[in-house]
Amino acid sequence: MQSAQSSAILLIVIKALLIVMKSLACDGAVGHFWVPGKREHNGWVADVSARTDLPARTIRYFEDYVPGLTVDCGSFTVDEAQIIEFARQYDPQPFHVDPDAAAKGPFGGIIASGWQTTSLAMRNVVEHYISAESSLGAAGIDEIRWPRPVRPGDRLRVTATVVEARRSQSKPDRGIVKSRTELVNSDGETAMTLLAINFVLARSPAT
């Protein structure tokens, strides 16, 4: 008898949780993704993934990259050993590879190569902003800036924002999306900004 009652209670709890989850989805709850001023676009509702550094993957096509859309791509850290290892191979300037020389240099210590932080940010963008199902590569980068040095132990949060999106006139099965990627450290300071232009497959061809 008690077992039957427990099972009934469990079913009630599960149903209640499902109702709550459904209501959050319908409200366009903010998780790691939001569309300013919009709750739904072309029948597609905002992602309601949990607020962690590993949000659920969302498949996006050209129609989903609405100007103003911002995606939180999580965060990463980099330690001194990683900084030195990368720089020895790709950017062997003293303030990237030699702690003693770096301490006497313009930054007062070891800092990460801008190319390393850009590469690490790209990994997060690929995992949480670009979709393998629709990505057709990039035309290039309009600009990249490193206004603040990245130091060992810094935690950097990655966001990507759609600046512009337009359908290709010559190839109507795709669109051209310009996005701004930004890295912000735990002090709220911007460590990198980047403007990229990507080709993205459309969910439906233009008519």
Image (tube, grey):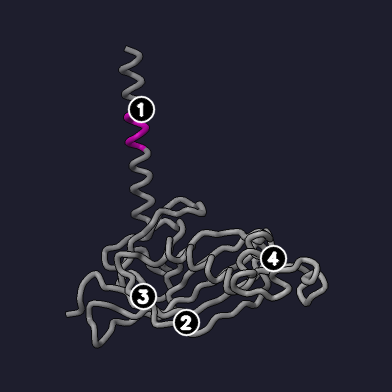
- Mark drawn on residue 10: 1
Quarter of the rendering containing residue 38: bottom left
Q: According to the image, label 3 marks what residue?
A: 137
Q: According to the image, label 4 marks what residue?
A: 151
- Mark drawn on residue 141: 2
Residue 118 placement, left or right of 172: right
Q: Residue furthest right?
A: 104
State the CA–CA distance, disc 3 to disc 4: 31 Å
Task: Please tell me which residue lies in front, 202 or 82.
Answer: 82
State the CA–CA distance, disc 2 to disc 3: 12 Å
Foreground: disc 1 or disc 2: 2
Q: Position of residue 42 (x, y in %)?
A: 27, 68
The type of residue carrying mark 4 is: Arg
State the CA–CA distance, disc 2 to disc 4: 25 Å
Above or below residue 202? Residue 51 is above
Q: Are marks 3 and 4 in contact (CB under 8 Å)?
A: no
Q: Quadrant of the N terminus?
A: top left
